[in-house]
Amino acid sequence: MTDLPTSLARRGFLIGGAAVGAGALLAGCTSNEPPAAQANGGANVAAGQGDNAKAGKMVTIGFSAPAADHGWIAAITKNAKAQAEKFKADVTLKATEGTNDASQQIAQVETLINQKVDVLVILPMDGKQLTSVGQSAMDKGIPVINLDRIFDTPLAYRTWIGGDNYRMGVNAGAYIAAEMKKKGISNPVIGEIAGIDSLPLTQDRSRGFKDALAKAGFAVGPRQAAEFTVETGEKATANLLQAAPKLDALWNHDDDQGIGVMAAISAANRKEFIMVGGAGSRNMIDKIKADSDVIKATVLYSPSMSSSAIALARLLGQAKGMGDLAEHEIPALITTYSAVVTKENAAQYADVAFDS
């Protein structure tokens, strides 16, 4: 994403692929129980099951990600390290210092290549700029797990894993539409606090939101774009609330900027509407569970995907496949699912929440 501001660059494109939930099927589950994901010092890790739980060939995984200057990115690195620790019997993790300088990240990945790691997991600062180094690793026989922000060509990665921006919007819209119908509101005023409008990820989220509301016979009303920061979330929401004396519902794209959104709502003393968040931060899920504020749900875009990326890298390094799939090989594309977290299921998703 070349147009993503340095301090805000943290979300990727959706290109489709096999949809999986957080803590995905990385091992041979033998029952209908959900795949085991475990809280580990505030991080989220997947537990190996079946034959894949057994220690195998030692695998050295190189990991590179942007600087942890936001809750979501911080959780990406934290989860990756926790997942490697979970598999410490057969995994050695070589993690670079996070950087928001694409040139520096390229140099760090080149160092990992020269150290002959077995597998690379890369969340690029900029997918376009890091494509060449990803392809260089692949050309040298080092498989690359491309995390979230996708490279320009599939030749630069063995497997891509990331979130579903369009589905975030669809699920947020579907939840709000259902709530409006449940309340018997036939012509609701539905607001939207978006992220950066120029970014494809924001456009995908807004398109999904619009599509879901249209399917229910509703439309997006007052709308403001923020910039994924607390300050811009607060400013955009204050403007929206000032222009809309009455709201029935509001979707905020991002729980990190949601701190500012909630501050603006509190400052305006507005309580007449319901709100849905985005990403799945711990503080928002706690508020949803308490049911004492306007926020009633959030749609996931979970950093647990980095735990899954490390687990996938381990399996790749050991030439193993994923349990419950007929294919011998790990899929080339894996899209995580944007589940809707509500008061009723908040406890179920506590393990994939992150600190914003």
Image (cartoon, helix red, strand yellow):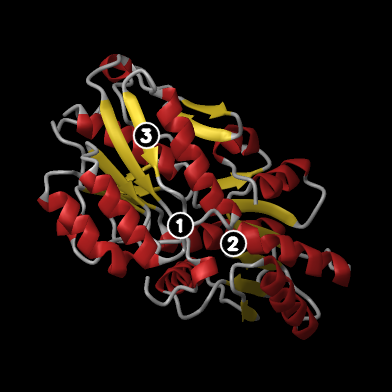
* Distance Cα–Cα, label 3 vs label 2: 30 Å
Label 1 Cα neighbours within 10 Å, binned few <14 / some 14-19 / many ≥20: many
Q: Amino acid at mark 3?
A: Leu
Which numbered disc, 1 or 3, marks the residue that appears first in the sequence?
1
Image-based side of 59 in relation to 206, left or right = left
Mark 3 lies on residue: 93
The residue under the point 48% across, 32% down is 82
Q: Amino acid at mark 2?
A: Asp
Q: Is residue 194 above or below residue 125?
A: below
Measure how far apart labels 1 and 3 are at the Cα level.
17 Å
Query: Measured from the top left, where is residue 16 in percent x and y?
Result: 29, 57
Q: Nearer the viewer, residue 295 or 56?
A: 56
Q: Quadrant of the N terminus?
A: bottom left
Q: Position of residue 241 (x, y in %)?
A: 77, 78
User: Who's the residue at 23% across and 56% down the image?
Assistant: 134
Where residue 135 sits: x, y (%)?
17, 57
From the image, tell me which residue sits under label 1. Answer: 66
Q: Secondary structure at mark 3?
A: strand
Give the residue type at disc 1: Pro
Residue behind mark 2:
254
| SS type, badge 2 | loop
Of callouts 1 and 2, which one flags the residue occurring earlier in the amino acid sequence? 1
